[in-house]
Image (cartoon, rainbow, N blue to C red):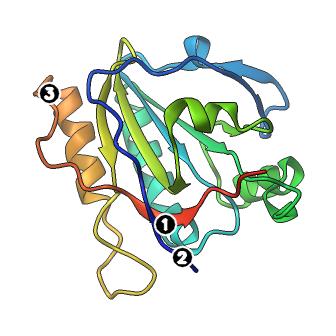
Amino acid sequence: MALIESNYFQIGEKAPDFTLFDTVSGKNLSLGNIKGEKGTAIFFICNHCPFVVHINHELVNLAIEYQAKGIQFIAISSNSVESHPQDGPDQMKLVAEKLNYTFPYLYDETQEVAKAYDATCTPDIYLFDKDLFAVYHGQLCDSRPSNEIPVTGKDFRMALDGLLAENEPLRLQKPSIGCSIKWK
């Protein structure tokens, strides 16, 4: 599998708006209606990527912890189901239920949202403040499926804590690394 790094996303840039189908609730949800009171974490993931599978449990743990503090978590899958049917909406719902996602798992069928965010890999992680201005775009932590480093969410946790403390965005933001988004 080829490793891809996330593209640069300007800190301070406004989050592109979207309305997408939530595979968990069966409803269309818009960013403006579900954003968090204190911030919003958006991560592009999918069902099959070993990098996402490797960190999924920590994403769930972080969501539980930080949703209680006013940060909304939103997962989006933009992979083509033509080449990767296991990433389709029915399978997304099953994964969300199995892993007890406490956040929406949205399906970006047209891939327009991934393009608007210039997302390139899974996972591709973004954090926005209460007004939806970017404060972080980077990795969860240094753990990878191929190394022995535990999954802690350290980098993303520092960004979340900094946002809640109203600190300046982290100076060092390491890009996320994972599988490429499967484009149509």
**Callout 2: helix, strand or loop?**
loop
The picture places residue 167, in percent across and down from the top left corner, at: 10, 27
Position of residue 7 relative to residue 46, above or below, is: above
User: Cα distance, mark 2 to mark 1?
Assistant: 8 Å
Mark 3 and mark 1: Cα distance apart in space: 29 Å
Q: Look at 40% across and 39% down and name the residue there.
A: 126
Element type at mark 1: strand
Q: Amino acid at mark 2?
A: Ala
Q: Nearer the viewer, residue 108 or 163?
A: 108
Q: Earlier in the sequence, mark 3 or mark 1?
A: 3
- Residue 85 image-quadrant placement: bottom right
Q: Residues under labels 3 and 2: Cα distance? A: 37 Å
In the image, what residue type sits under mark 1? Gly
Question: Where 122 sits versus 125, above or below?
Answer: below
The local secondary structure at tag 3 comes to: loop
Q: How busy is the neighbourhood of tag 1: few (under 14 within 10 Å), some, or many (20 plus)?
A: many
**Label located before the other in sequence (3 or 2):** 2
Q: Which numbered tag is attached to residue 2?
A: 2
Q: Is the residue 6 above or below the residue 107 in the image?
A: below
User: Which label belongs to residue 178?
Assistant: 1
Q: Could you tell me residue 14's position as x and y percent? A: 39, 17
Mark in front: 3 vs 1: 1
Residue indicated by mark 3: 165
Residue at x-position 51% and y-position 73%: 54
In percent of the image, x 22 and y 28: which residue is there? 164
Disc 3 marks a residue whose amino acid type is Ala
Give coordinates of residue 161: x percent, y percent: 21, 38
* Apparent side of residue 65 relative to residue 28 in the rendered image (left or right): left
